[in-house]
Image (cartoon, rainbow, N blue to C red):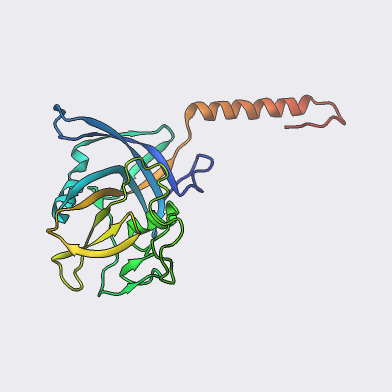
């Protein structure tokens, strides 16, 4: 259940709720430490998810799945005041997608092709960030303004192709589905291919909670306003 105690939080599609400090080697050693946005998507195909704004360099599908699953041991969360996160699962993961027989198309209703928003990365690319595919829904190309033009609060999203966590089980589990953040296409690839990037997300319920100081100020303001209203003379107009 999502709770909102902060103005505007219910309307926001993508919201930065804090950062995560990422110890790249997991042991606090000499490897550089980065701090990356935690970006909440309050409705990604019916799910509340939090994205980690970090692109893991190209690797095999198995390596990227393992990288995502191990993230919790390398991250320190810095949630912004006014927000609370309750994780719905134990690990980070790669985005999921549809699975099924090969069906190519442009109108978003197929398993392969363009304008598919039913995958978590497709939903992010098209619906949340507002990007356009190389092909429009009628199959015409190139579509004006196509590509990763809008990245919102993502500072590390790249125009590369990313692995999903979904195997092509309907046909051949040796393959997995991928999403191209450049042209906006979805297609399968051999899981042993060493080149797909990794982008992690995690299911979580985000609550916007009131800040104590803000509540006190609001209460004081209302009390003062009520007292002022009682003191105003008959016939005077109160303007707020």
> Residue at the right extreme?
235
Q: Is residue 78 above or below residue 13?
A: above
**Residue at horizontal 85%, vertical 29%?**
236
Q: Is residue 182 above or below residue 221?
A: below
- Give left or right: position of 237 versus 129: right
Q: Is residue 131 above or below residue 234?
A: below
- Give left or right: position of 42 versus 240: left
- Pick the residue in front: 2 or 166: 166
Residue 238 visible in the current orientation: yes
**Residue at horizontal 16%, vertical 28%?**
28
- Residue 197 appears at what percent x and percent y? 23, 50
Quadrant where the image shows the C terminus: top right
Residue 47 visible in the current orientation: no
- Residue 72 appears at what percent x and percent y? 21, 41
| Number of disc labels | 0
- Residue 80 appears at what percent x and percent y? 39, 33
> Residue at the front extreme?
142
Res 26 quadrant in image? top left
**Residue at horizontal 20%, vertical 67%?**
168
Res 163 quadrant in image? bottom left
- Residue 62 appears at what percent x and percent y? 14, 54
- Give left or right: position of 89 versus 191: right
- Pick the residue in front: 215 or 15: 15
Res 239 quadrant in image? top right
- Pick the residue in front: 160 or 94: 160
């Amino acid at each position: 259940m999502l709770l909102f105690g902060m103005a505007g939080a219910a309307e926001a599609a993508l919201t930065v709720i804090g950062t995560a400090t990422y110890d790249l080697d997991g042991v606090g050693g000499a490897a550089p430490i980065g701090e990356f946005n935690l970006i909440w998507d309050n409705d990604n195909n019916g799910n509340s998810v939090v994205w980690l704004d970090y692109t893991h360099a190209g690797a095999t599908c198995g390596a990227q799945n393992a990288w995502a699953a191990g993230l919790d041991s390398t991250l320190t969360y810095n949630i912004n005041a006014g927000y609370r996160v309750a994780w719905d699962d134990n690990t980070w993961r790669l985005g999921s997608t549809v699975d099924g027989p090969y069906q190519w198309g442009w109108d978003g209703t197929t398993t392969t092709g363009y304008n598919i928003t039913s995958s978590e990365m497709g939903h992010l690319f098209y619906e949340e960030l507002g990007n356009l595919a190389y092909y429009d829904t009628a199959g015409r190309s190139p579509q004006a303004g196509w590509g990763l033009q809008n990245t919102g609060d993502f500072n590390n999203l790249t125009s590369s192709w990313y692995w999903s966590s979904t195997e092509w089980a309907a046909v051949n589990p040796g393959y997995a589905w991928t999403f191209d953040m450049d042209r906006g296409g979805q297609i399968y690839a051999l899981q042993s291919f060493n080149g797909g990037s990794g982008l992690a997300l995690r299911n979580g319920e985000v609550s916007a909670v009131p800040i104590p100081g803000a509540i006190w100020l609001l209460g004081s303001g209302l009390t003062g306003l009520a007292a002022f209203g009682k003191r105003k003379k008959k016939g005077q107009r109160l303007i707020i």
